[in-house]
Amino acid sequence: MSTLYSPNCSFSVNDSRLATSFSISSSESQDSQQRITVSSLPKRFHRQNLYLHSPRNQRRNAVRMEKGEVAATASFPANETPMTRFKDELLKIKSSEECKDVAGFDNEESAVTITVVGASGDLAKKKIFPALFHLYYEDCLPKHFTVFGYARSKMTDEEFRNMVSKTLTCRIDKRENCSEKMDEFLRRCFYHSGQYDSEENFVELDKKLREQEGGRISNRLYYLSIPPNIFIDAVRCASSSASSVNGWTRVIVEKPFGRDSESSAALTRGLKQYLEEDQIFRIDHYLGKELVENLSVLRFSNLIFEPLWSRQYIRNVQLIFSEDFGTEGRGGYFDHYGIIRDILQNHLLQILAIFAMETPVSLKAEDIRNEKVKVLRSMKPLLLENVAIGQYKSHTRGGITYPAYTDDKTVPKGSRTPTFAAAALFIDNARWDGVPFLMKAGKALHTKRAEIRVQFRHVPGNLYNKSFGTDLDQATNELVIRLQPDEAIYLKINNKVPGLGMRLDNSHLNLHYAARYSKEIPDAYERLLLDAIEGERRLFIRSDELDVAWELFTPVLKEMEEKKIIPEYYPYGSRGPVGAHYLAAKYNLRWGDMYV
């Protein structure tokens, strides 16, 4: 820790591998003191090169921040505070520096090994290995890192590297050294074949890991890209036979986290026999999407939105997920869970919690997750009368016949598993009382889309009602956050069409990411993998959060199964079953994507 003082201000910084703290003392107002703490920032921002500059006409004192210690003095003008100055300087950090010196990775004495358990599966090939390569490509991985694949398939290291190489792609803006980077990355990839429940095989894996770690401090991350019924066996073997003895060991667990409250609780108990809660990283990749992470920024750092974020101005909130393809041979897995468990109970409910939560105390992981849990605990259990379900049927369009869900050979004949679901949920608290949160998700629909639509209330006593006619919904202001594809944030407003008459038009104030930002948006798995390596838990699900989420959906899921509810059939490529529109109409609402 180092500190320099001036008559007006003192600035001190203390940086370590685990946290960074800043304190600023100011004597601007009768020796009053302001303190700033940013230990909650992700570690990749902690060791940046920052400078503090006073205004052009004032004396400057700046000392470069690096290697964990810095001291600087600065004088602030009358209309600025240390907080505003620090915020401005922090925002100037270049994105190209985000991944450098992450979490002490410049330490020659430590190594990080990422072991993908289930390395021969689709998820590993389509998402995990490409994400790891992109992190390496962007210089986000530590100097001493190794990637291991572990699966039952027999493969040599060279065969494994050949398999991985077929999954890798390059960043659009950095093609010039792509092949060189790929070769470097592949030389760090190794493979070990073994059974997921064999401690002997994991002992052999441990020997290979230690060889690559070369006597350095061992930090190990296991990614369980395997079916949930073998999670506990794999964790038991990894924990007892291949965990780190002098560093950290962390495990990423993929959804589904059970089928209901009971199975989820059993899975949690099984994992906690061998791991502490802070070692378990339950991943929901939707939380890693750029615009989901931007939700709290949009709301808490823009004055115009926070006052509107309540029942007083918001009429309803819609969370919409649609895919334009069916199960395509994966019906066996899907039929066991269905669309409600697969999408509504995790992806959409997590987004709802982030959207509706109160302002957290800080950006620390536990403070954010505490607020999410509060939202979920305030919600009414989902009722069957507030659910509409459907299943896609065969449909011929343009001379092409598209199959029904039950035409998939991996789906049991006569299956009643819904491929579409819509639901209305409510939050019993002062901010959101009476506001419907509508969810809708489905397969084999007319388009591929994931978005949040915030529909505001009608303008009371609107002077221009006659210009809109009887359909006031067409004149409703709406904030749309499009998560994928073609990420964007746009606000629908009413505007006068140029001319001598008084004709109104519905226009968009549009932040289109591809047009505004030249940098390619990282895949969600890149962000989540990097956070897991850093030990940053903001975007991962805590066990009590998971318990409350299942409590909301388990009763209605059991009721549907007991009553053998038959889903409404809808044609492949349509907008879904009519029942979803009746559900919205029950609350005098329309789905916002009807006109898209």
Image (cartoon, rainbow, N blue to C red):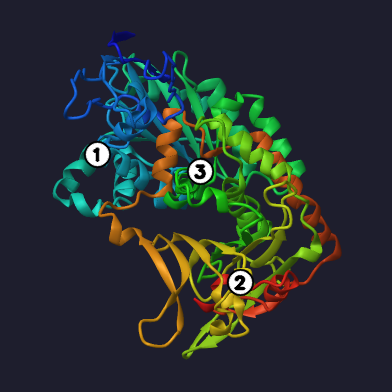
Residue 478, placed above or below residue 358: below
Percent across and percent down for residue 373 are: 66, 39
Per the image, the residue denoted by label 1 is 96
Give the distance between the C-alpha atoms of the residues marked 1 and 3, in whole angstroms: 30 Å
Give the distance between the C-alpha atoms of the residues marked 2 and 1, in whole angstroms: 40 Å
Q: Tell me which amino acid carries mark 3.
A: Ser
Q: How many numbered marks are there?
A: 3
Q: Earlier in the sequence, mark 1 or mark 3?
A: 1
Percent across and percent down for residue 285 are: 50, 48
Location of residue 592 by image quarter: bottom right
Q: Earlier in the sequence, mark 3 or mark 2?
A: 3
Per the image, the residue denoted by label 3 is 225
SS label for mark 2: loop
Percent across and percent down for residue 38 are: 43, 25
Which residue is at the front of the view, 173 or 279? 173
SS label for mark 1: helix
Per the image, the residue denoted by label 2 is 591
Q: Residue furthest right?
A: 563
Quadrant containing the N terminus in the rendered view: top left
Q: Is residue 425 left or right of residue 455?
A: right
Give the distance between the C-alpha atoms of the residues marked 3 and 2, in whole angstroms: 36 Å
- Local crowd size for mark 3, using a 10 Å CA cut-off: few (<14), some (14–19), many (≥20): many
